[in-house]
Amino acid sequence: MSKYKTVTVISFIVLTVMAVMVIGAPLFTAKDPTGVELTKTLRQPGQGNLLGTDEMGRDIWTRLLYGGRVSLSVGVASVAVSTVLGVAYGAISGYAGGWVDRVLMRIIDALLCLPSMLIMLVIQSMTRPSLTNVVLVIGFTTWMQMSRLVRTEVLSLKEREFVLAALAAGTPVWKIILRHLVPHCSPTIIVMATVGVGHAILSETSLSFLGLGIPPHQPSLGNMLIGGQNQILAGAWWIPVFPGAMIISTVLAITFASDGLQHILMLRNAGIEEGVKKWLKISKEAA
Amino acid sequence: MNLPAQTETCKPAMLEIIDLVKYYPAGGGSLSSPQENIRAVDGVSFFIKEGETLGLVGESGCGKSTLTRVVLKLEEPTAGRILFEGEDVTAWQGRKLRELRKNMQIIFQDAYSSLNPRMTVEQIIGEPLANYCKDTRKERRRNVRELLQIVGLNPEHLQRYPHEFSGGQRQRIGIARALALRPKLIICDESIASLDVSIQAQILNLLKELKDGFGLSYLFISHDLAAVKYISDRVAVMYSGRIVEVIRAEDLTKEAGHPYTQSLLAAVPLPDPGKRDSKQAILRGEPPNPVKPPSGCRFHPRCPRAAEICKVTEPELQAIGPDHRAACHFVRQKFKL
């Protein structure tokens, strides 16, 4: 049990450090992420460039920070899109019930049948690659799981007496969904959204790696990987290794963090605050 | 029986229910098997006069809670009519339904699950006010404080959450919420069943005070005969989705005509068990299956007085005296009518 807590705490620390470094990127590097210096191509880590340079002489450390910024913001923004969409769709479906619910859920089943990467590729190859497009495409292809979970919760929540009481008190349906039902799904929503950020970052890197994500001149973790693949045989291992390690550690940290979050939220009785208090107590005892 | 009941002053009743039916589908309905229904409420009629309290008793699963939900229009009735102050509200929707809800409120059985655990007392009691009154936050807070005072809670506890209160206090919050819109009718759905006996008495007295203070009418649902007798003017007894007897509360102990009412009365524990009337049999057997209720009189498999006719013909509610009706083939015999 205590081992489990340690992992959670470590992942939260890793994520915080990454967020700070990525958001405050200019504080940690003086160089320009797109600045090409053809006299300094393929330099090894160390000599004036902390993590070396790529084939165009761009500083890897700087690109890592700015690339991480792009990848993390794509992750967070696309999850915001998919969460809003998924929660709204699921809550409406669950609350309406009956045939509306059945139709809406069959639409989701149909969408889930299509591999989302394929849809992303098709849409991305038809539109011009840009940050906004990547966010929207990932957001619009990953909301289905969230909406299924929210729908299931709403289905049981709407029978609870406080919802009936609100209905009898004349509360309009949209207000019941927003003020009574969705807040009660928040543990599920939070956990799903955290997991979603990891997936979204992976999707972004895959899209960029295939050349359909972030435009190549902009740094992103996926772009850095594709740039590195030609240079591995030339012995420039540092070009793909650092962004690769960054992707793996971010996604792992997010996965473990969401696992921990789930435990915290499942322990709750009277709300999230209570759950956090309990969890802190347990971890203190364990320590 | 299908005519709207007239009170003595010829004023329409506050609430009148006519042949109300609520079925829930229970499987079947394919080509091979016929559609089966749970007959939760199966032809119920009653009325409540202004300022009157009608008690509704019956065992678990007899359809009491379904009845409240249909009357409040939280669920659509399968058949039948609901009249509020003489107007047929059965098909009301939208704006009209909103206006109706202002006049009919409910207090639930379990005060904890009927209060949203993530909302403060101010938000909970303020919710109906926010829905109907365009008042400022300050005014609303003043109203909520006043309501808290009326139901005997500390008005300083506005920012507390439901889990910070005791069971009795939570029920008072529920009462304050029901009272917020100054309704004409409040339905108490087993509102005291989950409370300690001493708290039950407090809540009952509070309900009585509020009734006098605000001129309310109650539909008071319970399976506690003593409480129902204490608070009600008339008592309706429900069995398997039907009303089997309606009687004035003060006559309940002495004049009960239906064997089911009598067995309910016999089941009330006495301080001296030796004084129990040995002829009054304690009810045996299980409540009937609401999907396939017994033929004829639904009570006949458990009735000590059942005869052949009871298995075949379903008895209608028949008048025995003023404000006293019972659905039993032998009730007229009993009262020598």
Image: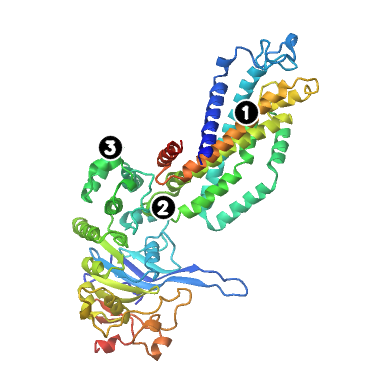
Mark 3 vs mark 1, CA separation in Å: 46 Å
> In the picture, residue B296 is in which quadrant?
bottom left
> In the picture, residue B298 is in which quadrant?
bottom left
Position in image of residue A168 (x %, y %): 37, 55
Both marks 1 and 2 on one chain: yes
* Residue at point 23%, 51% (across, down): B151
Position in image of residue B210 (x %, y %): 21, 56
Task: Look at the picture and state if B54 lies above or below A187.
Answer: below
From the image, tell me which residue sits under label 1: A71
From the image, tell me which residue sits under label 3: B138
Mark 1 vs mark 2, CA separation in Å: 40 Å
Element at label 3: helix
Element at label 2: helix
Question: What kind of residue is marked 2?
Answer: Val
Chain that bears disc 3: B
Q: Which mark is residue A163?
A: 2
Looking at the rendered image, the disc whose residue lies closer to the viewer, 3 or 1, is: 1
Element at label 1: helix
Question: What kind of residue is marked 1?
Answer: Ser
Q: Is residue A72 visible?
A: yes
Q: Residues within 10 Å of mark 2 (few under 14, many from 20)?
A: many
Question: What kind of residue is marked 3?
Answer: Lys
Position in image of residue A214 (x %, y %): 67, 27
